[in-house]
Image (cartoon, rainbow, N blue to C red):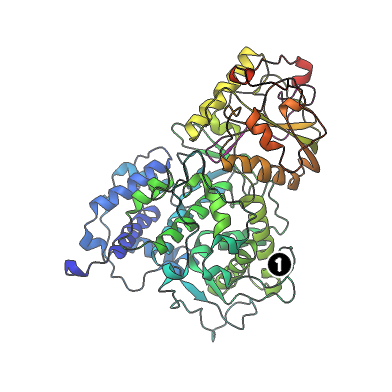
Amino acid sequence: MPPGSWNPTTVVQGILWILLGLLLCPEPGTASLPLLMDSVIQAVAELEQKVPVTEANHTVSVWHLSAWDSDPHDPLHHFLLKERSLKVTKLDPSALSPELQGLMEEVARHHVRGGREYGVVLTPDGSTVAVEPLLAGLEAGLQGHRVIDLPLCSTATPLGAGDTFPDVGAEVSDARATSPGLRDVSPDVSSADVRAMSPNVRTTDLNVGAIFKDDRVTSPDDQTSSPDATAKSPTTVDSLLVVTLARDLGLAFLQNPQTQSHPGLGAEGCWDQNSVPRNFTLLDPEASPVTTAFLNGALDGALLGDYLSRAPEPRPPLHRLLSQYYGAGVAGDPGLRSNFRRQNGAALTSAPALTQQVWGALILLQGLEPAHPQLQGLSQKELAQAATRAAKEFTEAFLGCPAIHPRCRWSAAPYRGRPTPLRLPLGSLYVHHTYQPALPCTTFARCAANMRSMQRFHQDTRGWDDIGYSFVVGSDGYVYEGRGWHRVGAHTLGHNTRGFGVAFVGNYTAELPAEAALRTVRDTLPRCAVRAGFLRPDYTLLGHRQLVRTECPGDALFHQLRSWPHFDVNVKPRTAKSTSRRSKRKPPLVTMPATDLQ
């Protein structure tokens, strides 16, 4: 092929096919690296450096295609992502070093077995990500937003011998023109104050692409668990959402129609060690495969796939795109990074739109696999009900809730003594600032170090059993679990059994926390606590100074709290009115008796 006819997009696709081929057919007996996203990015970079452009231009891994053909787990992925027009070239096994081949062997397939989760890696932001849906999203994005036509008169029964499969040829050739971005890049955005969007913003306000707007359920009751009789059956699906999220989400809710956010959807876990992670154990041993790590990988794949489908030629190298996304932000946009995947995912789709995608994915899978044990003989109504439940639970309990790093993620020391359980639901939320550390933490490494520092101070200096706060909110997009939802804290003297103590990292005497952090404490954290039964719907929100003689949570932050919903105006602050001098000094420490801490 003459150099002038090389297609940069096809080159990148060829690289990705080689990587996927190595994932599925690795060289046995090779050593492995720590299960880190940085190592996966290293593998992608090594392939992009070593594979000649002339080969990558028309290479599809025979190993990859044969693995898909022989593996009944993913006929849908093969059906949607196979490249029909490319020539096949056998892959040189030495394309990757033995260490990287060993790594890719471990992350080849995502699955849950015996309380352990496989095929996941730890990312720089502290989150755990399943690699399989991430790579599937990248490939779907490189192919563009392919709209797959479903059978128009489907009754959601297996396709017979005389039926035809959906039209895979239907593509949106100008997808980048018809699918606007998740947001416009703003020069005002900084890593300390990301314009993270609220999940309850209307989809039309977020400039979602036409491909999703046309697929919405028209029933006014589409947010409930039972679809209205007038809801339209889907006629198309988008390959990007199907291969990353919709298929697996739908199957999870078919498997257990009563799946709830706790503990079924989005179960978290702990690494054996955070510096050199090797084994990931779920906190709920009965968790479904739709874990937090899987949903993280699916969202990342969908978001990056969407970005690639709209990116002009030449598209960025995949290793650079991944490095930016799991780093400071794609193309200099700190809002488009893994820390804010949930907010960006809420901008990408909505519950009605996702219902149609999940419903359509189940119909498509039922046609491809007539003998599928979960789909065999199911009616259109049953598929629609499962899709509606799945989309509602995902958008409300996952996209609509903040990402909370469990204690093991920031390497918490053990609780000293015997914790006292809370009697839920509680009636209040108490807002604090840490004062020390005084600076906001904007990275996982810094936030985790701050958590360990505060815990040491509370345990070793003050003699408490644990870090005092229930939760701590960083400026990195994450909430950090302190004593959590179930243990009495040591944060608000005389009131620890009545409410949760939530602290912002930093000193907010003269300035405010990042907008994304404020939104977490004002909106998403309490809303999800109410939904889960931890907090009463009529809860009151108070600043620390309203209950204890202290200047916490700082003048600027307390003034902001006064405008928030649920703020209790009837409880007056217990600080002196004149605080201009004292605000410049560290507030006096409040010594709490042991009876109130536990």
Front-lying residue, 183 or 101: 183
Front-lying residue, 396 or 511: 511
Residue 20 vs 545, above or below: the answer is: below
Front-lying residue, 521 or 93: 521
Residue at screen point 66% across, 40% down: 521
Q: Picture coordinates of residue 536 (x, y %)?
A: 80, 42
Residue at screen point 54% across, 28% down: 411
Residue type at mark 1?
Asp
Residue 316 magenta-drawn?
no
The secondary structure type at the circle numbered 1 is loop
Res. 423 image quadrant:
top right
Is 205 left, or right, of 502 in this rendering?
left
Q: Picture coordinates of residue 78 (x, y %)?
A: 44, 67
Res. 309 image quadrant:
bottom left
Q: Which residue is mark 1?
A: 222
- In the rendered view of the protein, which quadrant contains the C terminus? top right
Is residue 27 among what the camera can see?
no
Residue 486 magenta-drawn?
yes
- In the rendered view of the protein, which quadrant contains the N terminus? bottom left
Is residue 504 among what the camera can see?
yes
Q: Picture coordinates of residue 141 (x, y %)?
A: 42, 62
Residue 413 vs 118, above or below: the answer is: above
Q: Picture coordinates of residue 357 (x, y %)?
A: 58, 67
Is 213 left, or right, of 536 in this rendering?
left
Q: Which residues are magenta?
A: 474-495
Report the predominant secondary structure element of the magenta stretch.
loop
Is 170 left, or right, of 263 in this rendering?
left
